Amino acid sequence: MSIEQEKAGAFVGRLWENPTLSGLSPLQKEEQLLQFLDINSKTLQPTLATAAFFPNLPWPRILELLKLSLSDYANKALAPLYEAILERKIDFAFTQHMAHRSASPSAVKSQMGDFLTSLSGRANSRKELSGPLMGVGTGLIDRYMEKVFQRQKYISFELRKVQRLKISSNEVTDLVKATLLIRPVVQFHSTGGQSSSGRNLLLISPAFAAKVTEEAARYLNLMPEPVIKAGVNSSLSFQDNPYMESTARLAAVFSHRCRNLKPGMKVDRGAESSDKSWFNVARKNYKFYGFDLDMLVELHGIAAENGW
């Protein structure tokens, strides 16, 4: 490692350990610090050009070194995070009730680990992974799905009667988690404008979804294809595709909700809880994001009832 790389690592290390970033996932930290470097370039440039740092390097090269070091910090934290999530936060036993029953849950889990590593290796899908990792890793999906099945209302009906999931409630919850983790594969295959449904860049067309599903099924060949399809379809608009899977609709909502989630954040007295506030805003913008409004209404109700 060169002296410049060591200096960049030391500087980024201090930023990485900033207490204001505690509770964030590695990808959230990375995104926050990338924004910090870009926004504060004019302020940082004179300091980092001094003899104590990088006196003989142009600013673009300094910035490149800092961003490479930041990526290294995030990658070192991602590997144990993937392992922890796959070992303790999701059970792939639900796959035994679907196609590919010859593949053991442990084999599916191992393949999913490789899949997540691939997703984090490309900028677009790396950024999209933030929400799914937070949703699964923090237990947010678990607590909402528990209330969904207790209520036995719209979302439960869609899962049980419409999508016809004949597995236990815990297995349905794990199925939703798997769907969420697969979702970033859309961005992995997106190359500027080809995926857009025409409404906005967040949504894709059914034709593009079909192509991505076919491609993803090749390297997730132990995962039942309906799960892969739902993960991809979570980037479709529900308004334009009213028959899309309920698991896909849930994955879309949870992914967006969790992208900027900060666990343990205290709410000021009299203020709306963070989840309730988010679902309230999402209800107003549901068409833009392609959400299922009835799902948002129920999730907002759950958040309100439980002070989330």
Image (tube, rainbow, N blue to C red):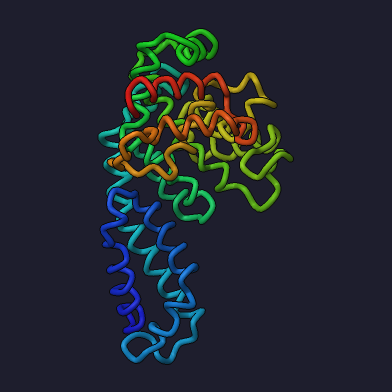
Does 106 sit above or below residue 40?
Answer: above
Q: Is residue 154 left or right of residue 194?
A: left
Q: Is residue 194 left or right of residue 154?
A: right
The location of residue 196, given as percent across then percent down, is 69, 42
Nearer to us in this view, 23 or 305: 305
Nearer to us in this view, 60 or 190: 60
Identify the residue at the far front of this view.
Answer: 270
Q: Quadrant of residue 51?
A: bottom left
Which quadrant holds the N terminus?
bottom left
Q: What residue is drawn where x is 40% and y is 16%?
A: 148
Nearer to us in this view, 271 or 276: 271
Q: Is residue 152 left or right of residue 265?
A: right
Does 152 sit above or below residue 19?
Answer: above
The location of residue 306, given as percent across then percent down, is 32, 23
Q: What residue is drawn where x is 54% and y is 35%?
A: 217
Q: What residue is drawn where x is 69% and y is 26%?
A: 240
The location of residue 84, given as percent across then percent down, is 27, 41
Does 116 sit above or below residue 170?
Answer: below
Q: Is residue 108 visible?
A: no
**Image label count:** 0
Q: What residue is drawn where x is 35% and y is 82%?
A: 4
The location of residue 198, given as percent across then percent down, is 74, 40
Does 283 sit above or below residue 35?
Answer: above
Which quadrant holds the C terminus?
top left
